[in-house]
Amino acid sequence: MSSADLRDLYQQVIMDHNKKPRNFHEMSNANHMAHGNNPLCGDALVVYVKLNAGVIEDLSFQGSGCAISVASASLMTEALKGKTLEEAEYLYQQVHNQMTGEEFDASSLGKLEVLSGVKEFPARVKCATLSWHTMHTAMDNDHDVSVTTE
């Protein structure tokens, strides 16, 4: 896919997931959760995870933020539902690497590849990674914790 095509797809997917975020709700039966906050731009969210036998049975989020922050969280919830902890960890690393310009496995990303457009705007990387860092923290803790990125 050409860089122009990827840029157009990036804009379309970001706007779609921002206007109609998937899995945007509080999860009352979550057994892991974390609060994420980026005080520099005002993005704030809560990630809810229901883990069962090492598999992400359900995943949702609530909060507010810029289009990139909301879209990234929405894409994340779609991509990680049904994944094992190991698969989720691998995707977390690949997404982080693509957004920070490090080497990554593009074949593992699928629809998440559109987030590679964020690296063209370094100030927005924290917006796009906030939900991923928050999810990662939630997986490591079985109680409510907070993540702050700056």
Image (spheres, rainbow, N blue to C red):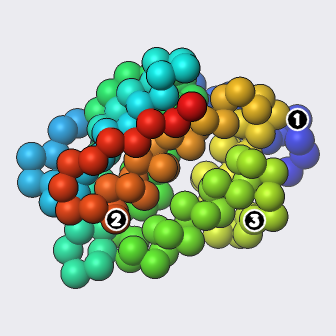
Q: Position of residue 30 (x, y in %)?
A: 16, 55
Q: CA distance from mark 2 to mark 1?
A: 38 Å
Q: Nearer the viewer, residue 101 or 40?
A: 40
The quarter holding residue 74 reads top left
Identify the residue at horizontal 20%, vertical 74% (top origin): 52
Q: Amino acid at mark 3?
A: Phe
Which tag is nearer the camera, tag 3 or tag 1?
Answer: 3
Q: Amino acid at mark 2?
A: Asp
Q: Secondary structure at mark 2?
A: helix
Q: Position of residue 24 (x, y in %)?
A: 30, 36
The quarter holding residue 15 reads top right
Please tell me how crowded label 1 is: few (under 14), some (14-19), or many (20+) other residues with Cα within 10 Å.
Answer: few
Q: Is residue 29 visible?
A: yes
Q: Nearer the viewer, residue 115 or 20?
A: 115
Q: Is residue 74 visible?
A: no
Q: Secondary structure at mark 3?
A: loop
Tell me the quadrant of the picture where the C terminus can be found.
top right
| Label 3 sits on residue | 104
Q: Position of residue 54 (x, y in %)?
A: 29, 79
Q: Nearer the viewer, residue 149 or 139?
A: 149
On residue 4, which mark appears? Answer: 1
Q: CA distance from mark 3 to mark 1?
A: 20 Å
* Residue sticking out furthest to the left: 28
Q: Secondary structure at mark 1?
A: helix
| Label 2 sits on residue | 140
Which tag is nearer the camera, tag 2 or tag 1?
Answer: 2
* Label 2 with label 1: CB-CB less than 8 Å: no
* Label 3 with label 1: CB-CB less than 8 Å: no
Q: Earlier in the sequence, mark 3 or mark 1?
A: 1
